[in-house]
Image (cartoon, helix red, strand yellow):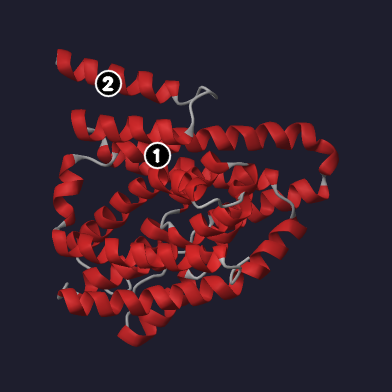
Amino acid sequence: MKNGNLLKAIFWIALLGCCWPRVSAPIALVAGITFGILIGNPWNVTTSVWSRRLLQASVVGLGFGMNIPELVKTGKDAFLYTAISISFTMVLGYLLGRFLKIPQRTSTLISFGSAICGGSAIAAMAPVIKAEPEETGVALATVFTLNSIALILFPPVGLLLGMGQRQFGLWAALAIHDTSSVVGAAAAYGGVALAIGTTVKLTRALWIMPSALVAAWFTKSEGKVKFPLFIFGFIAAAAIKTVLPHYNQVWQPLNGMAKQSLVVTLFLIGCGLTREVLGRTGIKPLAQGVILWAIVSVTSAVAILTGWIN
């Protein structure tokens, strides 16, 4: 009982510490992962639910730092190369899954999550292809593990490659799976990277619905396709800021709160990376995810640095 109370106290102290503006996204993530792996997370389900809700609210709040003309321009530019990136990743994922002899539904979920939007895409596709809970769990664990690595790895690699903030925002949005990790990595790189990364990532996430519907048509599935509604909240917040710019003294604090709540979100996400999750991943699905992620990361970085994507 005493150990349980001590565990709760450590968790709450760390969580409240992440509310302090001096605590950055990478620090929060490392603290969460340390807690999850070394101590264990007895509230895995609860933290998973709240990290998802807090992420959605944070993304909506980030909309108060944008404006509609900005969103339209970035989204329009991103539409073509997100479509190409998604198609390339899905085909490559399919071929890797066949080569590694990974069960088809598990391979499809990993490919879909890698191509579009990580956990959200997997959650949307799972009922469509009638995936078993274990298959969904393996795919989520694989993508989640890679997201955590990307969050820590991408900012220093971006600096090493000499990427500007716009370039890094594009790279993070195209090569990192989950919205939370894209936003976290971009926030650590800078304000412009955060704005570009969030917008391009949400443009990429818009492909969840049509992709899942195509999969449902091919598999003749009647499973319900879920769409991440927080994207519309992000657009609505940007629209409000655009229409009412003279209330900037309100929008700026809301945007600041959203950025800090992302830090808290990343701590909760890190807590979910426990030894049990790592053990459930499996070597072959992890190999598919790593190879797929590495190829997409390198390809997109080369395309950005050489000016093919700008």
N-terminal of the two: label 1 or label 2? 2
128 or 173: which is nearer to us? Answer: 173
Residue lying furthest right: 246
Q: Position of residue 182 (x, y in %)?
A: 48, 51
Q: Quadrant of the N terminus?
A: top left
Q: Position of residue 300 (x, y in %)?
A: 48, 66
What residue did someone put label 2 on? 8
Q: Residues within 10 Å of mark 1 (few under 14, many from 20)?
A: some
Q: Quadrant of residue 177?
A: bottom left
What is the distance, in whole Å, between disc 1 and disc 2 at their CAs? 16 Å
What residue did someone put label 1 on? 50
- Residue at 29 percent of width and 19 percent of height: 10
Helix, strand or loop for disc 2: helix
Q: Position of residue 42 (x, y in %)?
A: 21, 32
Relative height, residue 279 to residue 90 (above, below): above
Q: Amino acid at mark 2?
A: Lys
